[in-house]
Image (cartoon, rainbow, N blue to C red):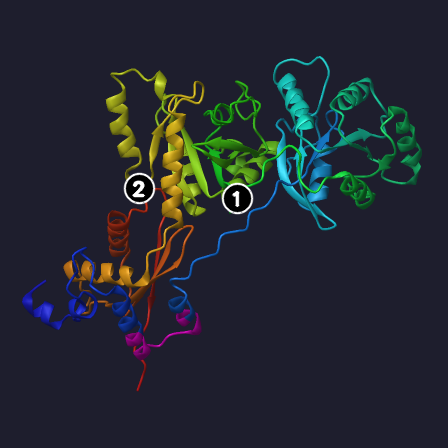
Amino acid sequence: MTDHDRAAAPDVDGDLAPAPGPDGLPADDGARAEALRAGLAEYELSGEDLALIEEGDDLAEPEAPRGPRPVLAVVGRPNVGKSTLVNRILGRREAVVEDKPGVTRDRVSYPAEWAGVDFTLVDTGGWEVDVAGIHARVAEQAEVAIDLADVVLFVVDATVGATSTDEQVVRLLRKARKPVVLAANKVDGPRQEADAAELWSLGLGEPHPISSLHGRGIGDLLDAVVEELPEESAYGEALPEGGPRRVALIGRPNVGKSSLLNKLAGAERVVVDETAGTTRDPVDELVELGGRQWWFVDTAGIRRRVHQTKGADFYASLRTQAAIEKAEVAVVLVDASVPMTEQDTRVIQQVIDAGRALVIAYNKWDLMDEDRRPFLEREIEQDLVQIQWAPRVNVSARTGWHKDRLVPAIERSLESWDMRIPTGRLNAFLGELVAAHPHPLRGGKQPRILFATQADTRPPRFVIFATGFLEAGYRRFIERRLRETFGFEGTPISISVRVREKRKR
């Protein structure tokens, strides 16, 4: 820029960057922000603009602590309609359902409510006798769900009647000594009422005739369930103030998400098998790490294209997207033993698009040859050149190697995700930045930054009021300097510009 251009350009330095104090920021940020606010009176501002400017420094109040919700586990043999019943109770299609046995594999928890009573609803895989392989592990998860439940909802297919497997489940329930509510499913009309009555023979009390598909009898069934539920769970722990932070484990299929969750939980919490795509429903687990509790959510692997999947895998992909949106931070697992794929990049972008905090975990790092590691480090730097702000951890899901490094990375990302920059300090920072690096002249004009505020956190979102549009390259420059100055490690940042003109006199 020539001396003539500098003379013609707006006096950004004089407006926004007074002499800095000893910490590199203006001596009175608050006074500077108030002066800039007053200056905005000359510009055309909407009611939304004014509200945004006034609320810039407001902070949300933390949630009050709450006790553990009572737990209701839904169990039964395969294909009796457990997941359909879960969806009916929730009032939405949450659990993956397909017209074949064995779709649900893990025990999956959902918050639910009936008649003003909040409880945790646990869907389980079908329980079978004398099965091997993945089916045996599914049955084990159903047994664990019974052990950790306050009340068990036992679902039987009334059209088939009590089978030998149902009788085995009854013996398991009696041994557990838990209150049991018996649901006689697939009673679609009065003709099947007699079929339901025959289930008295199981010795579990009154069978409640229902149709999970059509919703028949669900209200009466839930009334019976609520009568058995305690006020608080005998098997959970009181949640700390604000509740545990939610962490989603995501990545492409068979990258080690379920193995990592099992290692973090210290138990075989999730079904793990060599077959890719074992997990279908997102699985929540309360895990204690680093002296605090976390909700870890294992998810189905994100495949190349959602529209290329079908059946249970299609709905599992949609559930994974929902799990990301419900989480606060996502740990994206990448297989270090193979080159990073387009799929991995798409998964990371999915987290950024959802506005969630991000940690990238390279799995199977312990299997890497010492000579290979320096080359791999350089490859990773190239692969992640656009997201160098995301913390990276090298782990082994199989052995638990370096799992303790996950918590500091997650905490850094969440701290940045929650961060709010005071309005005065933000404007002082921008004033110095613009004074040192003005926006390029375009057509003899230079846009002038009038005022900036942080409109939101989780993720941080900044709004800049200016006299002209700021180019994308300049906004990226502002983002880079924001990260260098304030941190923001592990969180996406959004910067939007509102162009405002002076009021006509």
Is residue 97 at all visible to an observer of this figure?
Answer: no
Question: Horizontal placement of 255 versus 182: left or right?
Answer: left
In the depicted view, which residue is nearer to us: 459 or 387? Answer: 459
Q: What distance separates the C-alpha of mark 2 from that of mark 1?
A: 27 Å
Which amino acid, mark 2? Trp
Q: Is residue 47 magenta?
A: yes
Q: Quadrant of residue 498?
A: bottom left
Location of mark 1 (residue): 243
Q: Main secondary structure of the magenta part?
A: helix
Q: Which residue shows up at 53% across the image and 40% down it?
A: 323
The quadrant of the picture occupied by the C terminus is: bottom left
Q: Which mark is residue 18?
A: none
Farthest bottom residue? 505
- At label 1, counting other C-alpha atoms closer than 10 Å, the crowd grade (few under 14, some 14-19, many 20 or more) is some
Q: Which mark is residue 389?
A: 2
Element class at badge 1: loop
Is residue 392 at all visible to an observer of this figure?
Answer: yes
